[in-house]
Structures are given as C-alpha cells and as structure tokens.
Amino acid sequence: MTADDGGSAELADLLEETAEDLYEHAPCGYLSTLPDGRIVKINATLLGWLGRRPDEVIGQRRFSDLLSVGGRIYHETHFAPLLRMQGEVRAVALDMVAADGRRLPVLVNSVLTTDPHGAPLLVRTSVFDAADRRAYEQELLRARRAAEHERERLQHLATTLQRTLLPPALPRVPGLDAAAYYHSAAPEEIGGDFYDLFPLDQERWGFFLGDVCGKGPEAAVATSLMRYTLRATAVYDSDPVSVLAALDAGLRRQRDGGEQGWCTIVFGVLVPDGVGFRVTLASGGHPPALATRGDGVVEALETTGGQPVGLLAAPRFVATSAVLAPGDGLVLYTDGLTEARRPDGSMVDETLPDLVAGLGHLDAHGLVDALAAFLTDLGRGLSDDAAVLAVSVPGPSGA
Amino acid sequence: MTVGGRADGRPMVFAHGFGCDQNMWRLVTPAFADDHRLVLFDHVGAGGSALTAWDPERYATLEGYARDVVEICEELDLTDAVLVGHSVGASICVLAAAQAPSRIGALVLVGPSPRYIDDPPYRGGFSEADIEELLESLDSNYLGWSGAMAPVIMGNPERPELAAELTNSFCRTDPEIARHFARVTFTADNRDDLGRVDLPTLVLQCRDDAIAPPEVGTYVHRSVPGSTLVVLDATGHCPQLSAPDQVITAIRGFLPPAAPGTT
C-alpha cells in the first residue's frame, strides 16, 4: 500500500455521502412543488435560511407564500406563466421572507416536469443566496438612475440654450413670407447651426445663416458672439462683405488661436424693389444660397471662392445679388442638409436644387415644411444638425 | 396583432394582462378557431408591439389602453365582438366596451380586479406599500434578466419555435414601459365602471388566486348587472395556462352556439 492509496481511501471515505445528505445539506436551497404551488419537499438548507420546521411548510404553504408581496405578484404575473410556457425559468431575483420577517434576497431557478402528454407534474426549484449580488444590483440601479437624471438635466439645459441662440419666431416682413427650421441630430448636444432675420431700418432687412465649427458649449459661446456681432455691425454698415469682415475680426480676437469658434456663413440684405425685393448677399465659405423662380427653376446663387470667417489671416468674401420677383424665393441651408443620406445611401449633396425643384412651387412656409418632413423621414440618415431659412415673395395671384 | 380563425365567424378579441403577452392565450384560442374570428394583440410595450407607439400621456390611465382595443375593432371593422380580457386586460375591455358600445357584443373577464389596493370595506388584496415593493422587484428583475434570459432560451433546443416566441416577448418587454404599466395597473380604480356595463358578461374566477382573490371576483359579478360568475377549480392567476380546458368550457357555455353553417 502506498501513501497515495491511503490518500485515495481517505478521500473515498470523505465522499461517501448519501444522495439524501447531498440534497438536504447542499450549499443551496431546494424545494419541490405541485403545479398548484403547494410545497411537497424542501431541503434542510432552505428551511434553515427560513427559520422554519418541515411541518410548517410541507403541505402547508405554497412557494409564493414564502415570498414578499412584490415578489408574489411578480411570481403570479411573470414567473408562473413563463414556467408553464417554456418549462423552465432561470435566474429570477426574488425576496423570500423568513419566519422572523427577515428578507432573504435570492436567485431562483425552476424546472417543470411533465407527464408524457405534457401535463405538468412537479416544479423543482433551486434557491441561491443573492444578498451580495442584490446589493451590487441596487448600487447599479442607483447609478443608472443618477445617470439618467443627469442626462435629462443636460438635455434640458442644451435645449434651453439652443433656443436662446435661435430667434423664437421670425418677424413679420411686409411683402415677404419667411420660415425657418432647425433639425437637431443629437438633442443632448448644442448644435452649431444658427440663423436670424431682423430689421436694419424701416425698409431693409438683414438675414444670415451659418454653421460654426464644433459643437457643445464652445459652439454656443461662438454662436452667441456671432449673433450679436452681426446684428450690431449690420446696423452701422450693412454692406454684406463689410459685415463679414467685421465678424471675422471679432471672431479672431475671441478665438485667440483656438481650434474652434470659426464659421461658414451667408449674410444678406433684403431691400424692397418695386413689387419684389433686391437681395445682396455675401458668403464666407458657405454652400450657395438657392433662388427659386416663379417658373419652377431653382438656381444656385454662386459665391464660389469665399473663405470661412474667423479662421484665416486675410479671408476673402464673395458677394452676389439677385432680384426676387413675385413668385420667387430664396433658400439658405447648412451642410447638415446636403450631407444627409437617403435610405439608399446616396448623399443629397449637389442634387439639392433638383430636390427643391421637385417639391413643387411652394412659398417659404411650404418649402420649409417639406424640407423638414424630408429630414424627419431620413431619421438616422442625418448625422449632423441642419438649419434651413427661406423667404419668398408672394406670387401675382397671391399664391 | 395576430388575426386568425374563421374569417366570417363572430370576432373574439383577446387582451392579455400585466406581465406577459398574447402568448398567454395559446392554450385557449385553438378551441375557438373553427367558428370564430380570433384577434390577438400585445399591449404597447409588451411582446412584439411597436415601442414607437408609446406615449406616457396617452397611457397614463387604462383608458389609453382601452382606446387601442377600440382602434383595433375599428381597423378590422368588427361588430358584436367578444372581448376576452385577462387580469388588468379585463378592466381594459370594460373601458373599451364603454368607448365603443356599437362594436362590442359580450365580455369575458378572466381573473378581473377593478382595484388591487384595499379601500375598506372593499378588499383588493394589497396595500400601497405592497405595490411600491412590486415596482422595486420589477426593477431588480429586469436588470437581472437582460442578460440572463438569453441562455435560458438558447437552452431549449427541442422546441426552437417556443424559444423564438419567447425571445420576442419577455426579452423585448421594455422595462420602462412595463414599470409604467405596472403603476397604472396596480393603482387603477375602475369599480365605478363595472356598474355601467350593459353587455352579457362572464366572470371567470380561480378558486385560489393570489392576485385577484375570490371575493374580488364576487365583487365584480355583483357589480356588473346580469353577469355570470364561474369559479374555476384552478389555482394561480392564469387559468388560461393552468386550466385551459375549464376556461374553454366556461366560455363555450356562455356564448350562444354559433349560427348554423358556421360550425
């Protein structure tokens, strides 16, 4: 006989435990119930946890009687139906209640045994102590609730701030229909698109639409600065190129070499001209404004060569002008619209004039509503915020 | 929404209760498929319902859920429909019948409870603290279930069709909506609505039900004028699963026999 054999024999003695002993003193609770819930068998471990004698439980109580009230409702509305439908339920968190009223957080697994015809015979349930796990879960839940609360707060803050950066409503301009739309791709973030339409004097109106580089608080600061700079400057000297030059100087002072805080923008002035308006506008690196003509033609008012505002040492701004006759309109937009992807993956990009022409001959409100619906339908095809500002001169028929 | 059975048969619309989805009716509906048009659906937030339809204001009370039942009846242009509602689904059916009396012909209320919280001398079976505790236990379970349920379903290879169905129901139940539905369900008080029911009504009550005790079934029976009460020799809150044959027999006995030519 070797030393090893002696070890094996001792081990064999040690393992000479009966199935009954394994059942009764397993490190988890066991119980068996009839399909109506009555307990017909329960092991010593679980009785010990519950502080009960076998005769208090067996044949006397149902499994759900041993649960907290919340757990009992959960058992009846979720656990039991699920067990009946799929034959087993695993890892459900419940609270059992001991004889002295103590709560025992447990994880429960159950299997349903059936006769050959599928009729339920017996439910076998194992019960694991989950006090530690429940504590972690409560902590997780608390953290999740705190995070959700913070996210709501942030979203509220961002939405409020965003509102202050856009005009609450466009002013009523005699002889002109004006409408705007802002599409936020991520509500919890402050976007960098902005626009406005405002009076310069009794007759003339200034307008702008731009896209500031970046998002979030820095973009909000830059946007706010741009809005009041543009409004204040334009009242003194409304020449669009001069206005952009003044904005450029203001932005570069403010940026002080930072990465953000520059923008692309179209600024313009509307002056009544007989039955319509003359529009003069200048672009600083922004996509061209579109003129919609009464005959259905849509043309880009080219301002190629204009450079972003606030970015370069001596930027060049390009001006153009056009006449808006009755039935004509003007559409300004940010690249959120041109970079939107249709469901087939294609980008709007250069097809925008066709897209606008395809919407039919609409006034500013009709056009903005149609573009808003187009953007809303794209849903996830939008990766960036998008802004649209449109004005139109009512047609001869008043349409 | 699932529509089946006999297309020209009398319509039966099945409204599930809190906690599961239209699968709850699977052992009962086949018995009516030959002579009834069967309409099953999931309440918003449960099973395969479209989560985009969820609107906390619309569903702030059971009336919102009842409006869904009415809209289903209108969309399918049902008349003389038998509304079969389980648990809170029964209250929803009572409200739907009041909203669209021209479309509803009869009510079957399975384990109904017009109010779960005690209001002495009325006994619903629960205190307000009990209901708060339920909402907490829901939270901890959805947290635990999100990952834990998938293996259960994967581990049922001999019945893959069951697995697919359950993946589509429990795992996709939206926890936020379920919590909201639980609150609306267990704080509802629809006792006054029972007296206004003016339809042939069958009340099915389990002998032993921890959610809707027998005295609640009796209360419903007494409150709904002319209703029929059948006490099932069944335990638990879901007799359509635990005693489907008794449920079928009781409904068969309550509904007038199908018109000649539709059997």
Image (cartoon, rainbow, N blue to C red):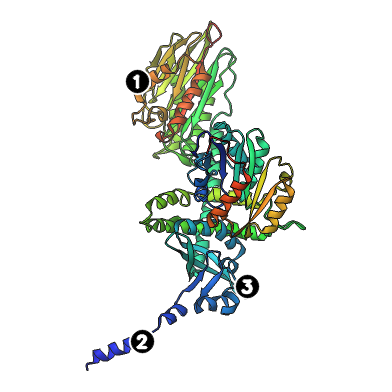
- Asked whether, in this view, residue A292 is left or right of residue A102, the answer is left
Count residues near mark 2 (Cα–Cα under 10 Å), then give few for <14, some for 14-19, many for 20+: few
Look at discs 2 and 1 and give the one toward the viewer: 2
Q: Which mark is residue A47?
A: none
Q: Amino acid at mark 1?
A: Thr
Q: Which mark is residue A101?
A: 3
| Residue B52 visible in image | yes
Residue B128 x, y percent position in the rendering: 68, 58
Residue A197 x, y percent position in the rendering: 54, 22
User: Which residue position holds label 1?
Assistant: A304
Q: Amino acid at mark 3?
A: Gly
User: Which residue position holds label 2?
Assistant: A14
Out of B162 and A375, give the one closest to the viewer: B162
Q: Quadrant of residue A47?
A: bottom right
Out of A329 and B136, give the one closest to the viewer: B136
Count residues near mark 1 (Cα–Cα under 10 Å), then give few for <14, some for 14-19, many for 20+: some
Residue B204 vs A129, above or below: the answer is above
Look at discs 3 and 1 and give the one toward the viewer: 3
Q: Amino acid at mark 2?
A: Leu
Q: Give the position of the N terminus of chain A as an image quadrant.
A: bottom left
Residue B48 x, y percent position in the rendering: 47, 44
Tell if the residue under mark 3 belongs to the same chain as the one under mark 2. yes
Q: Earlier in the sequence, mark 3 or mark 1?
A: 3
Residue B134 vs A290, above or below: the answer is below
Q: Chain of mark 2?
A: A
**Mark 2 and mark 1: Cα distance apart in space:** 90 Å
Q: Name the secondary structure under disc 3.
A: loop
Q: Name the secondary structure under disc 2.
A: helix
Q: Earlier in the sequence, mark 3 or mark 2?
A: 2
